[in-house]
């Protein structure tokens, strides 16, 4: 028995993960009746799934797609330290990646064989492909920033959290080099394991927490080099409007940030229930009145009021590259809004994204609406 096809390393758990196996026994139903391939999936040394697969009717191959099973063991969640540290989080096994081994047996008649072949351990990641010529697109980001975010970046001096994700393929140290302020600073980061996503906070506050006094209110710009990417950061004023920072899961499985610093609007979607009654009341002694002291009785009474909070936020003017990149925000399944030091999960209300360019549309910004996803109750009457 042989593996004729296996998924490549760095494949996405959101794509088909197809294993193709072949044994000549499958083509001999007389000697090997009711033949089936048995696939056993192990994650971190523990068997989590066993499935039986009939041979393909013409090729006699076993075609085994384990994508739907494997992705259930890769559950990502935003747990970044928003207190200002430059290294905000590290995500590894069971979060951003899952390590798998597939073993194959055969079954025919009443016989089940021992394990006949064992595939090598493979690591799959929680990202997604769009229009693509193959199944794997993550390897160009190994030991580098896993983001399509363009430079430059505008931040305010008081920005506390602005995340850039880094794919540490190997568990060896890498440097984050900050140029600007009082001196050039080099932060050495050592991953605890291979194939981890390191979440780097490049905000002025995080860098000042790491190197007190590096930036002052007179600092106008700095740069941050991470792997092969260098981000130029311009420090701008807080502006007239409240600044919101939106953290989101990008297409490569890393968390990054966009600042929305223009006009914002808060709205409530309100749901009310009501019931009606007569405009008068009859007392125990038979008296009829329409007043309670000087207040008229209610004919319509509202009860069980509920409301949902929504925010509409706007960016500053965007470059074409930024507008292309922010499609990942609108498509993201995990989005969080940071408001005055607290981080709230939100739901994107937009269901489409129109790509725009300066040559066609002139100056462009992005306005998006977020639903805080929680229904609050008013007083029950």
Image (cartoon, rainbow, N blue to C red):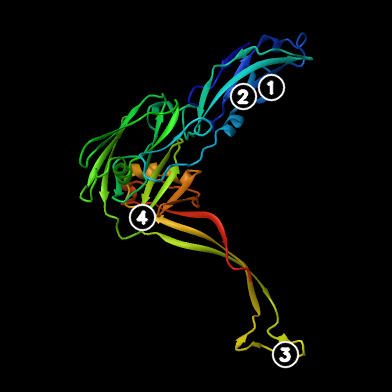
Whether residue 35 is visible, yes or no, is yes
Disc 2 and disc 1: Cα gap in Å? Answer: 21 Å
Whether residue 55 is visible, yes or no, is no
Q: Secondary structure at mark 1?
A: strand
Percent of width and height locating residue 127: 48, 34
- Name the mark nearer the viewer: 2 or 1: 2
- Taking 74 as reference, is 188 left or right? left
Q: Earlier in the sequence, mark 2 or mark 3?
A: 2
Q: Secondary structure at mark 2?
A: strand
Percent of width and height locating residue 305: 60, 66
Percent of width and height locating residue 246: 41, 48
User: Which residue is at 63% across, 13% downward?
Assistant: 22
Disc 2 and disc 3: Cα gap in Å? Answer: 77 Å
10 Å crowding of disc 3: few (<14), some (14-19), many (20+): few
10 Å crowding of disc 2: few (<14), some (14-19), many (20+): few
Percent of width and height locating residue 293: 62, 89
Kindly identify which residue carries mark 4: 243
Residues 252 and 134: in front is 252
| Circle 4/circle 1 CB separation < 8 Å | no
Kindly identify which residue carries mark 2: 46
- Taking 347 as reference, is 285 left or right? right
User: Which residue is at 67% across, 9% downward?
Assistant: 24
Kindly identify which residue carries mark 1: 53
Vertical position of residue 245 compared to residue 223: above or below: below
Vertical position of residue 300 compared to residue 139: above or below: below
10 Å crowding of disc 4: few (<14), some (14-19), many (20+): many
Q: Earlier in the sequence, mark 4 or mark 1?
A: 1
Q: Which mark is residue 288?
A: 3
Quarter occupied by the N terminus: top right
Q: Earlier in the sequence, mark 2 or mark 1?
A: 2
């Amino acid at each position: 028995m042989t593996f004729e096809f296996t998924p490549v390393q760095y494949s996405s758990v959101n794509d088909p993960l197809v294993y193709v196996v072949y044994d000549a026994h499958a083509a001999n139903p007389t000697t090997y009746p009711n033949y089936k391939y048995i696939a056993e999936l192990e994650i971190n040394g523990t068997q989590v799934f066993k499935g039986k697969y009939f041979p393909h009717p013409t090729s006699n191959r076993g075609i085994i797609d384990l994508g739907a099973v494997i992705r259930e063991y890769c559950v990502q969640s935003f747990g970044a330290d928003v207190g200002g540290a430059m290294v905000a989080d590290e995500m590894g096994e069971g979060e951003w990646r899952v390590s798998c081994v597939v073993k194959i047996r055969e079954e025919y008649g009443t016989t089940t064989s021992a394990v006949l072949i064992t595939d090598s351990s493979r690591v799959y990641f929680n990202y997604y492909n769009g229009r693509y010529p193959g199944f794997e697109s993550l390897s160009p980001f190994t030991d580098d920033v896993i983001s399509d975010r363009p430079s430059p970046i505008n931040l305010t001096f008081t920005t506390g959290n602005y995340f850039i994700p880094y794919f540490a393929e190997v568990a060896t140290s890498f440097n984050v080099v900050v140029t600007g302020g009082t001196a050039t600073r080099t932060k050495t980061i050592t991953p605890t394991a291979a194939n981890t996503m390191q979440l780097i906070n490049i905000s002025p506050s995080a860098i000042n927490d790491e190197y007190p006094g590096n930036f002052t209110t007179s600092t106008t710009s700095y740069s941050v080099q991470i792997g092969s990417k260098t981000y130029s950061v311009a420090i701008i004023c807080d502006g007239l409007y409240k600044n919101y920072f939106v953290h989101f899961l990008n297409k490569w499985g890393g968390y990054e940030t966009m600042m929305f610093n223009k006009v914002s609007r808060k709205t409530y979607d309100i749901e009310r229930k009501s019931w009606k009654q007569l405009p008068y009341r009859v007392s125990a002694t038979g008296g009829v009145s329409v007043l309670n002291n000087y207040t008229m009785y209610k004919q319509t009474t509202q009860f069980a009021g509920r409301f949902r909070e929504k925010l509409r936020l706007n960016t500053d003017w965007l470059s074409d590259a930024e507008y292309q990149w922010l499609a990942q925000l609108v498509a993201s399944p995990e989005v969080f809004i940071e408001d005055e030091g607290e981080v709230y999960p939100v739901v994107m209300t937009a269901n489409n994204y129109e790509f725009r360019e300066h040559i066609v549309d002139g100056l462009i910004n992005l306005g998006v609406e977020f639903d805080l996803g929680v229904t609050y109750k008013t007083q029950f009457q």
